[in-house]
Amino acid sequence: MYTEKVMDHFSNPRNVGELKDYNAVGEVGNAKCGDIMRIYLKIEDDIIQDVSFKTFGCGAAIATSSIATELIKGKHVDEALTLTNKAVIEALDGLPPAKIHCSVLAEEAVKEAIADYKKKQGIIIETHNQCDNCCREDR
Amino acid sequence: MMNNKNIYLDHAATTMVDNKVLEMMLPWYTEHYGNPSSIYSIGRESKQVIENARQTVADIFNCKKSEIYFTSCGTESNNWALKGIAYANKSKGNHIITTNIEHHAVLHTLEYLGKHGFEITYVPVEKNGIVDAEKIRQAIKKETILISVMFANNEIGTIQPIEEIGKIAKENGVLFHTDAVQAAGTLTIDVEKMNIDLMSISAHKFYGPKGVGVLFVRRGVKIDNLLHGGGQEKTRRAGTENIASIVGLAAALEKAVENMEEYNEHIRKLRDLTAQEVIKRIPETIINGDLEKRLPGNINFSFKYIEGESLLLFLDMNHIFASSGSACTSGSLDPSHVLLALGLPHEIAHGSLRLTFGWDNDEEDVETVVSQLVTIVQRLREMSPLYNK
């Protein structure tokens, strides 16, 4: 059900853990849905010098977190802000339909972390955590 | 540390067909292929072997041969029991009582009936995963036509007070159906003593073939057909009989009942050892469901701070096959309704692991699985933002 790329990032996740000297952090998702993603950034002069993640979630959630950190490392924050869930899916050679929301979470987590950095500079950017309404109360 | 031997710990999902059972089945595909409805000799011998199988099953559950109907699976048996009783008895009432931990084959069938004029009461189970029979009694009203409660739960293995509920149903003149798919072959079932009116079972849970089940229907119970067509199964269940599988079901059930004590002792020993070692070696682990009133081969853990699908993927990479109540394994975002029914918070329900033991497991498997779990759980916890150790 998962591509080799997903399984690779799941079984050998890149940039996992908490950065010692991060200066921005973003968290999305909730335990109810079964996915929480937290991205730590170390940004100097608007460049993402280092990035790491911590994720509670399924194989796809761990893989999308891992690839997202790779996709934004070394990038200017404004470029990183353009990361889309589609790019995350492509970089993983695809995701099963039921796991698309994991790629959305990765995109949102990156945006939340950058918004945290910008906020400290007095710039407010809009983010919307799509996961807030992705779980239904009752089925 | 890699494990290279396949370790199957999902016997509640399905079991391998017993070799002797398979041997008994094979001639009924090739040498004796006659249609049981035909009047010539090779048809008659097919008919006879089905009737012998029916007698075997009836003797095991202490009912009459004429009360045993062969179906294509547990799901069909449950659909037939619920829809058949609902539609045949709707002039008496439209109310059905069940629990909130039933298998989807029951829950989704009742949801369907709920959209077609029937009122369903879902009695919640207690925190230990067992329904209080008194609460079933309290839910009965004059429109109640049927109570459906599973014999034992598929996820947490909890055994329900079937005899007590049977008594309550009888006292109130309400029919009683039990989904005994997980119980048959492991627990002793006496439909007479337990006042069961309808019961579903499935062969592939006790080393029989997939694609064959039974519905027991007590004589005199008014039930509509689910499948209409030819005159098979005394005109109650149309469709050419799956002779080889029926032979396999009866043979597997007979063997399971013969070896029940030894089997239960074997799987209980492995299950208890696993539970003991996991609790000892993995902190912040919860066992879901009652520890005593439980199927001997079932254990269900929740490992705090981690998610079940990731755990299953890592186990799979190490050739260990298990299952989880995690939402991610079911294609929905909600974790198992059974674990939520126990009152577990979502994040804990997401981190569950079900191990179910069988003949092919041994103590070496337990040691391998436990040591793999120790490593995998720690690894996933270190990745988890919920874990702060």
Image (cartoon, coloured by chain):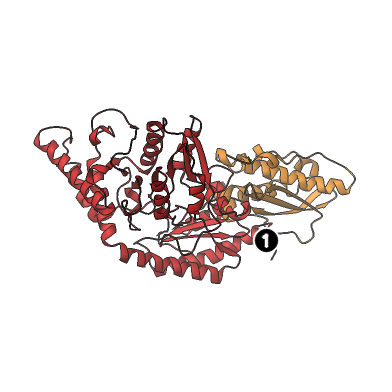
Chain colours: A orange, B red
Q: Is residue B330 visible?
A: no
Name the spot of residue B104 as percent of width and height, x first: 47, 43
Q: Specify whether B301 is left or right of B59.
A: right
> In which quadrant of the rendered image does the C terminus of chain B lie?
bottom right
Name the spot of residue A85 as percent of width and height, x first: 67, 39
The residue depicted at 39 percent of the width and 50 percent of the height is B166
What's the amino acid at mark 1?
Tyr
Callout 1: chain: B
Task: Tell me how many marks there are.
Answer: 1
Q: Which residue is mark 1?
A: B387
Name the spot of residue A115 as percent of width and height, x first: 81, 45
Residue A136, located in which quarter of the rendered image? top right
Q: Quick one: A64 or B139, which is closer to the camera? A: B139
Q: Quick one: B318 or B302, which is closer to the camera? A: B302
Q: Is residue B181 visible?
A: yes
The residue depicted at 26 percent of the width and 61 percent of the height is B258
Name the spot of residue B359 as percent of width and height, x first: 34, 62
Q: Specify whether A41 is left or right of B151.
A: right
Residue that lies at the very extreme toward the top in this rendered image: B229
Q: Quick one: B343 or A21, which is closer to the camera? A: B343
Residue A97, located in which quarter of the rendered image? top right
Q: Quick one: B193 or A24, which is closer to the camera? A: B193
Mark 1, secondary structure of its residue: loop
Q: Specify whether A132 is left or right of B125.
A: right
Residue that lies at the very extreme toward the right in this rendered image: A122
